[in-house]
Image (tube, rainbow, N blue to C red):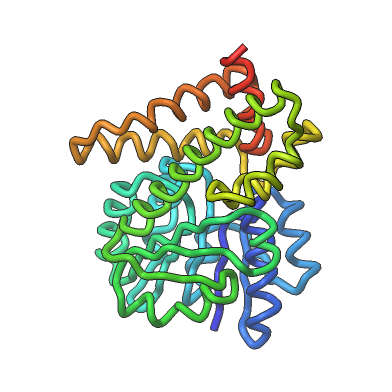
Amino acid sequence: MTIGFIGLGIMGEPMSKNLLKKRQNDTILVFDRNALQMDVLKKEGASVAKSATEVVEKSDVIFSIIPKSEHVQELCKEIKSSFTKGKVWIDMSTIDPSVSVEVSKEIASTGAVFLDCPLVKSKAAAIEGTLGIYAGGDKEAFEKIKDLLLCMGNNVIHLGTNGAGLVMKACHNNLVSQIQNGVNEMILLAQKAGIDPETFDKAISYGGGQNFYLSGKYRNIADNTYATAFSVENMHKDVYIVEKLAKEYGLKLSGINVTKKVYDHSLKMNLGKEDFSATYKAVKDLAE
């Protein structure tokens, strides 16, 4: 089998490396607009394509992970004519669910299948192969490629038709953003009262407020260091995706408005490229 992979960024590179390690009898064919990224994978044993179109032409299953909805739409226009019956395109980008539905129809017209399989957790999990993966699209096609997803993640769930994986991703990330905002605000308050973030984390663990964000990010806040595992600008995008979804379903969800304000302010502070825990600085700036 030839497995294609388009997009070798923060997440795509380690995910591709896990495919190389765990599917040694298959050919892993990669493409990224950054030639240096392709060189990294070539040294690991991947084959390198000259274009995304070549990846599709030569691969049985194609993975992609790129930044935004418009990028997936552009990629679809570029590669659609190279799809044939039997090929499967698995897009792991975090995009608008309606775009997934639109692209799935375009690809279905070629006889191929499109699945949206966005992921949760960040770079460390991508390296370890312990990502969570949410799948939307044809169930039969999902079952056929599930073993490939398990090369990159240890928790994989099929959630329904095209777009369903992305709805779940939006809900997940926005729950995280609201938990994050509560953690950021309470760490700020505790620090004002003389309680440092490490002690705060320990004390919270004695009760019912413990959470993954706090235990994973309090050290960033304590040390004021925000090396990017998942960026502010990526979460900002997700906040707006879930706001659109809420409007589509006629829901007024106040928590979304709070996190929107924080993430908008974070971008005004030029924090977009920093880790999303850097929103602590925005919370502090808004509070003081």
Q: Position of residue 169 (x, y in %)?
A: 42, 52
What residue appears at the point 81 percent right and 34 percent down from the top-left corner?
223
Compared to 283, does 84 lie above or below?
Answer: below
- Along the viewing direction, whichever of 58 and 94 lies nearer the viewer: 94
- Along the viewing direction, whichever of 217 and 241 lies nearer the viewer: 217
Residue 68 appears left or right of 212 = left
Farthest residue to the bottom: give it.
Answer: 25
Question: In the rendered image, which quarter is residue 23 located in?
Answer: bottom right
Compared to 66, does 57 lie above or below?
Answer: below
What residue appears at the point 70 percent right and 63 percent down from the top-left corner?
127
Q: Position of residue 35 (x, y in %)?
A: 72, 52
Q: Split into 4 quadrants, where in the image is the N terminus? A: bottom right
What residue appears at the point 70 percent right and 41 percent down from the top-left corner?
218
Q: Position of residue 209 (x, y in %)?
A: 55, 46
Compared to 230, does 121 lie above or below?
Answer: below
Q: Split into 4 quadrants, where in the image is the C terminus? A: top right
Residue 141 appears left or right of 234 = left
What residue appears at the point 66 percent right and 51 percent down from the top-left corner?
10
Q: Position of residue 126 (x, y in %)?
A: 64, 61
Compared to 86, does 208 lie above or below?
Answer: above
The mark tally for this picture is 0
Question: In the rendered image, which quarter is residue 6 located in?
Answer: bottom right
